[in-house]
Amino acid sequence: MRPSVYISRSIAREAVGIIAASCDYRIWNNDQPVPAKILEEEIKKSDGVLTTLSDQVNVAFITGAPNLKIISNMAAGFDNIDIGAATAKGVMVTNTPGILTNTTADLAFALFLAASRRLVEAENFLRSGQWQAWEPLLLTGRDIYGATLGIIGLGQIGSAVARRAKGFDMNIIYCNRKRNHQTEAELGATYASLSELLSTSDIVSIHCPLTAETRGLISYGELALMKPAAVLVNTARGGIVDEGALYEALLHRRIFAAGLDVFSQEPLPLAHPLLKLPNVVLLPHIGSASIATRTKMAIMAASDLVSGLTGKIPLHLVNPEVVREYPTEKS
Ligand code: GLV
């Protein structure tokens, strides 16, 4: 019998084709996320599910799905899935690492420039007819070149950001769970504690995953360590930054600006106080949103899903212990 699959959002046609070749599938063909109740019901009927980062797959969804073998998450992050519950039940979980690294690093850099050089404010100024004359001090910002960049989390994306920073003659410091000797040697990056990094960086860029340890990592105390001229950029996960604390810091100009692509609640509610501030650039979680990268992510997620349902070991398992305990045929 062909495996039964649920796809929680419209994805690239090529990816749907990969699933259709060996599975029966149902798809939530809608621009809005599938409601939690429908997702839960659909997972109950499925052998495999392809999810996106806006689907919260909690313990009840996993324990209530008798045939579920694999959750393939079309994202590098997987904090939206209860990995512990999946592993306990022998359900494979996969993600899409690597292929979005450069696209996301590009966006982090776009935010460095936009927030430091006040690009959005400047464009709004022009479009609203306020540009009367060239002025020596009009919309002056902070230089990127030669600045000190503090990278929190020097994994694949953090390292790709560091490589770009080299081209801007930036000094790179980083903190990470483990030292990354290769990137240190390659880019002259210096390892630092979080507090050293915060107090010496001109730009602080977040690239660590959201975990129990990193939730609320940047709050009042951490923001107070930053230089008044510094810029904070977050393209990782919203929950890593305490947004109330950041709002206060930006409002009282305790830091210069921020650039955010991710929020603790997405979509960011329109009434959110951050929207009232001129010194923050706000993007709707588009870190990996190039046509090529989103297509590759969908294909990777679909291929892993099919592998997991046809007796092969998916290439991007985040809980490989499941396969060791419930062996499948080697791919
Ligand atoms: C995007 O945020 C991802 O984790 O892929």
Image (tube, rainbow, N blue to C red):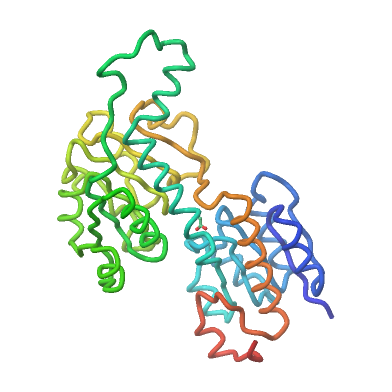
Q: Quadrant of the C terminus?
A: bottom right
Measured as percent of width and height from the top left, residue 87 is found at 52, 78
Q: Is residue 210 visible?
A: no
Measured as percent of width and height from the top left, residue 249 is found at 24, 35
Residue lying farthest to the right in this orientation: 1
Residue 307 sits above or below residue 232 on the image: below
Left or right placement of residue 109 versus residue 73 in this view: left
Q: Is residue 136 visible?
A: yes
Q: Quadrant of residue 73?
A: bottom right
Q: Quadrant of the N terminus?
A: bottom right
Measured as percent of width and height from the top left, residue 39 is found at 67, 58
Residue at the spot 29% in from the left edge and 56% down from the top edge: 151
Between residue 228 and residue 318, name the one nearer to us: 228
Between residue 196 and residue 127, name the one nearer to us: 127
Left or right placement of residue 276 versus residue 308 in this view: left
Residue 3 sits above or below residue 58 on the image: below
Between residue 324 and residue 64, name the one nearer to us: 324
Q: Quadrant of residue 281?
A: top left
Residue at the spot 63% in from the left edge and 90% down from the top edge: 330
Marks counted in the figure total 0
Residue at the spot 18% in from the left edge and 47% down from the top edge: 221
Residue at the spot 49% in from the left edge and 50% down from the top edge: 287
Measured as percent of width and height from the top left, residue 153 is found at 32, 61
Left or right placement of residue 208 versus residue 74 in this view: left
